[in-house]
Image (cartoon, rainbow, N blue to C red):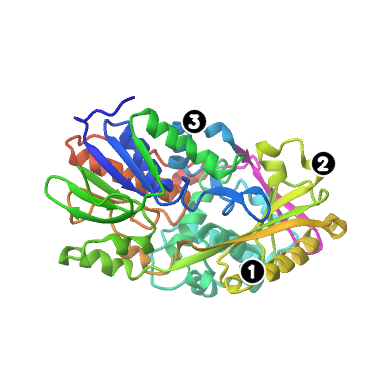
Amino acid sequence: MNQNPTQPSVAIAGGGLAGLAAACALSDSGFRVTLLERRPYLGGRASSYEHPGTNEVVDNCQHVLFRVCTNLVEFYRRIGVEDKIRWFDEMTFIEPGGRATVIRASSLPAPLHTAPAFLRFPFLSGKDKFAIARAIAALTLNRQPDTGKSFLNWCREHDQTDNAIRRFWQPILISALSEDLDLISIAYAAQVVRESMKSREARHMGVPTIPLTDLYNRAGDYIRQRGGEIRTRTSLESFVPGPSGVGVSTSLQPEERFDYLVVALPFESVERVLPQTPEAASLREKLSHFESAPITGIHLWFDRQITGLDHAVLLDRTIQWMFHKSRLLATRAGTEESGSYIELVVSAAKSLIDRSRSDIVDLALKEVREFFPQAQSANLVKSTVIKEVRATYSPRPGINTYRPQQSTVWPRVFLAGDWTATGWPATMEGAVRSGYLAAEAIVRASGNSTVNFLSRDLPAAGLMRLF
């Protein structure tokens, strides 16, 4: 499709999920889209590249989704990659020493569907389970406001045992929210619990079977097929808002005029491009309250199979998740007999930021051999460590107050990003929602007041429909 100069034009700064979602929605709505991305590839923090030290294509960090992520699922369907997501309906917890416990849904109605498996957890005592059950009931059945206290405070006030915190709440919430419990808002924690309990399907986990950049290149194709333009290695430097358009300056061009602009950058990059005017002061003040949370991905290649599992939650150690990439990636199907390629994930990885890569690999190798006995006789062929220092914004108590709406003081400038006001924490679902909300705001500003890009939330099922 060729560009039509009579179409309203929109520049979108940022080729991550938020920018791609906005670009795809606007491309479908008659807008002439120009997407600007400073990197040579799309996907933002959800991307992959050929690592020079290993000659392997690696994801910068493992990304997963759940069935409750209705807008992300719709986005994948829109760009034609829904079949590249492999879904799992059970999860394995592994203790040091190798004892594995599987959680899967029973035939009981939500939120009781996981109760039989939960009651059989051998790594939790009866006292732990009773405390957790009371807490889940409180979080699920009653709306939990952000009181300014952390979720760890809430756990102490609700008599959660140390073992329940360490072996249940930490694995679930640190992985979901990428932050330590003493820095997580109660409201965010409650949302994670409530969403995961609302139906049997809610906790089904999806894992991409192709590298992340291959996944999001499809979004680039989708935009181009509808007359849009993708400019990689091009960053937004500044913009000048006006009553009838926006002047956009990039790293390659002094100024272009667009009818609208979407700033879909990480929060720490937005301040740099804001105009030096009094109107920007309120947004700058909000941005000053945000802090980053790091995630570290550790990639290990072994000369033989170390486990038959596709993925697992790892308890009581630094590493929180194992993903068996040589089993998960479609491009490596059939090669698993010759070795294991695994990715290990550490969320809220502050303790690893200043450690050397060799130290982190040694730590990971030691822990992997604790969890997977077969790894004790396996040789490590190669490895790499990817530190995403600014992986997400920190979901701290009170931060919701400072999350800005997609519309700004400038009628033709809009924001997108998982850190904006989406109703969701810092997730891929939140990023897609922000892009769709920004696109909705632009279409409405152009005169269509009935547009709605957001998908319905996953409906509650079973007993959860009562709440």
Q: Is residue 246 left or right of residue 345?
A: left
In the displayed structure, 187 sits above or below 440; it is below
Q: Which tag, 2 or 3, sits closer to the chain's start?
A: 3
The stretch of residues the image draws in magenta is 86-110
| Residue found 18% across the figure and 56% down from its top | 409
Q: Is residue 390 left or right of residue 313?
A: left
Identify residue for label 1: 166
Horizontal and vertical percent position of residue 388: 53, 61
**Residue, disc 3:** 80
Instruction: Name which quarter of the figure residue 319 lies in.
Output: bottom right
Q: Where is mark 2, residue-wise?
A: 337
Dot 2 surroundings within 10 Å: few (below 14), some, or many (20 or more)? Answer: few
The residue under label 1 is which amino acid type? Arg
Q: Residue at x 64, y 39 (%)?
A: 107
Secondary structure found at label 2: helix
The answer to whether 324 appears left or right of 291 in the picture is: right
In space, the residues marked 1 and 3 are separated at their CA atoms by 40 Å
301 displayed left or right of 453: right
Q: Residue furthest top?
A: 1
23 above or below 393? above
Q: Residue at x 50, y 55 (%)?
A: 192
Q: Amino acid at mark 2?
A: Glu
Mark 1 vs mark 3: which is more N-terminal?
3
Could you classify mark 3 by the number of other residues whose Cα lies within 10 Å: few (under 14), some (14-19), or many (20 or more)?
A: some
Report the amino acid beneath label 3. Gly
Q: Is residue 257 in view?
A: yes
Q: Residue 193, how many percent across, how many down?
A: 52, 55
- Eye-nearest disc, 1 or 2: 2
The quadrant holding residue 297 is bottom right
